[in-house]
Image (cartoon, helix red, strand yellow):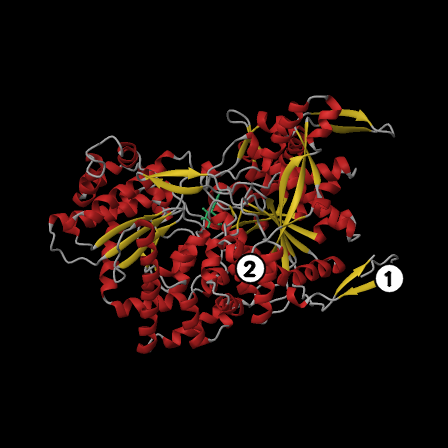
Amino acid sequence: QTLPNSSETVTEVRVEDDRTGLSVETLKRAFADNLFYIQGKFPQIASKNDFYMALAYTVRDRLLRRWLNTAETYSRNASRTVAYLSAEFLMGPQLGNNLINLGIYDQVNQAMQELGLDLRELLEEEEEPGLGNGGLGRLAACYLDSLATLEIPSLGYGIRYEFGIFDQDIKDGWQVEITDKWLSAGNPWELPRPEWSVEVKLGGHTEKRADEHGNFKIYWVPNQVVKGIPYDTPILGYKTNTANTLRLWKAEAVESFDFYAFDSGDYLGAVHQKTVSENISKVLYPNDNSAQGKELRLAQQIFFVSCSLKDMMRIMEQQKVPLEQFPEKFVIQLNDTHPSVAIPELMRLLVDEYDMPWEKAWGITKQSFAYTNHTLLPEALERWPIGLFGKMLPRHLEIIYEINKRFLDEVRMKFPDDTDRLRRMSLIDESGERYVRMAFLACVGSYSINGVAALHTELLKKDVLHDFYEMYPEKFNNKTNGVTPRRFMVLSNPRLCRLLNSKIGDEWIKNLYELKKLEAFVEDPEFRRQWREMKLEIKQDVADYIKKTTDIDVNVNSMFDIQAKRFHEYKRQHLNVLHIITLYNRIKANPDIDITPRTFLFGGKAAPGYYIAKLIIKLINSVGDIVNRDPDVRDRLKVVFLKDFNVKFAQRIYPSADLSEQISTAGKEASGTGNMKFALNGAITIGTLDGANVEIREEVGAENFFLFGLTTEEVYALKKEGYQPWEYYQKDPELKLAIDRIASGFFSHGDPKLFKPLVDHLLGNDQYMLLADYRSYIDTQDRVSEAYRDIDRWVRMSILNVARMGKFSSDRSIRDYCEDFWKVQPVNIELKEYVQATA
Ligand code: C3B
């Protein structure tokens, strides 16, 4: 093949069939080829990971045509694009999802079988990119899936952490953290794009100097410059030609360190500088729902935000879109406040680097950003101490002061003579040490502000952002979260899918409201029998897994009662434990008591610095040690803590649940998304009126949902009148006995000190009101036990839950975003047969 030598010359290169063909024969040949030429192995000595890699490359080859065509089409049309900025993308394993979305799962499964390999085992091999903590990061991943499926031009922008969320081990009942070296075996799904690297400035000071025309300008003199290198991962839509891009930035030193060595002679100093730069994308902060006011964290935020904005500007330049049209070309969605320094950074780029007048730049900025709030917890609302912020971002601090000055003028105009309002709304908190309030900055700089469930949005308007709601009511809107049925049903629950497809076809995968058609079969006893059998098979798989990993025997006819989510006091895993202890106490008081057998499964990580959360994990394991071994229990209760809950593991566990525990204190869980994944797989929820539970209950019907506990208003009212947890403890003998068991050292080899901090929290101020909700929870659990005994009734509830969950597809959420304020249209991608190489 000769290379074209002038712009008129066009060479057509036929893409080799081995790289695109989908027949089982071609897949086998391509797989063998990749094993040999990429992994460099004969099958006889190849490891499981070699086989996984060979298959991953075989699949990657088959999606590249979609990926390149998508990029080319967007570029040619200069399509309006959603830029989803997020510090976290909890993607989970890629291979299985790509097989599903390409529609080649069955062929590949057969090809592997014919080669004597087990596809499921190869899927297990993948080290998942755990670049997120929990709900917020996983939501971003679900949204990318839906954006691609709905053919919406979009880019995810984030950080390519070298170490993602830590792996969790359990030693002597305690959580132990292990660094997540997810890249060590190589990552076949990403392509580095070093030609699109950008530089980011940090630190230093600003100076006012005259430019070459004698005009005074502000110059930022940084003391550190780092390079951001983009790594692209394809995001396939389900059965469409669209393949969007997730672009993650890796930090490196600006020049190779030998450059510095030659330049300054300071070899070791130069190597040190390289390490400092690379540290920026080294590790994900492992906090969920709590802000870490660390310098490095702020460096991560400005790093990926600045890289991403410059990348958007590069794209505009390449597509010849004038900078003034930034808000027409891009809508930037801020996933919480983590990327909100994008607001002053865009101002800085426009004003300082493109010499735009302030008013014009501000007009562009406030039309470009939209902000999603994900939490009401005060400890999770980001605030940066002025000193730290100014040291890292001196120019951005000046810009924030200017934004604030103009904003407070606006407040004064709208609410004259209201100085307290000015103090409350200032972007700078001056009540003690001075802070930048990032949520307020996001509100001022965005044209849309949304919460993630109806109740959450109402509470934002009423409480945390009330002043901003009064100032800009038109900006506020709700976008209830959703989850992708591709990963959390099709991929994770093939048994359920087969059953659904046999009754209602497979339209539901793209239009989840189609599940409604299941209601027609709820009265069919044969269908209910099949449903029940399906659930049993799934539970058997999980029981085998539990046996293999923990050596605990569980009874598949017992109710699988599951709480899987990050550990946090507001999520109240310890309320669940109080229920377990209560059942245990009932058995101890009367060993022949007739109780519904249950298997309690827990999964989830605690932030490494969150002592009480880690103590709750220890408590679960300690209670399990006693309960699981006590002969009086006669295997009617089992308590299992499954370590290292992650996306891969979540996919395995959700389908097996009978009961889904969604028991947060009302008003604390913004939405929850695990609640949706469980219900979509046929679990019944026991839950409070919190987050999206409220809407799930509305959809599935109150009779198919176990509601308990105080409402948000009741929580507020009780707090106001002076909540006394001690009184509940004194009044309720079952509660008292449960807490006394913990306090006495019964679960800690007679050591009353071990769980004392936890007991003190509960009896002292009980911030999350476990004691107030205990009785209602226990009584409701008794109703759950009763309901489970009537298995036919339970199966009906399970079917109706699935049938009525259509609303909670992330496709619906994304459609709402698109129609309501993103104003972006789908772009159809045509697959071209040939790749054209032009000079
Ligand atoms: C979470 C919230 O805690 C969940 O209620 C919500 O469903 C998800 O976000 C997605 O919206 N969240 C989180 O995971 N991390 C934060 N820092 C804040 C909220």
Tell me the amino acid under the disc marked 2.
Leu
Specify whether tag 2 is near ligand 1 (CB below 8 Å): no
Task: State the residue in front, 170 or 600.
Answer: 170
Q: x, y percentage for residue 203?
A: 65, 27
Picture layout, residue 424 above or below residue 99: above
**Is residue 44 at least partly visible in the picture?**
yes
Picture layout, residue 503 above or below residue 588: below
Asked which quadrant contains residue 224, the reply is top right
Task: Estimate the spatial distance between the alpha carbons at disc 2 and disc 1, rounded to whole Å.
Answer: 36 Å
Residue tagged 2:
55
> In the visual, does 583 lie left or right of 610?
left
Specify whether tag 1 is near ligand 1 (CB below 8 Å): no
Asked which quadrant contains residue 533, the reply is bottom left
Task: State the residue in front, 620 or 298.
Answer: 620
Residue tagged 1:
9
Asked which quadrant contains residue 281, the reply is top right
Q: In front: mark 2 or mark 1?
A: 2
Tag 2: Cα neighbours inside 10 Å, few (<14), some, or many (≥20)?
many
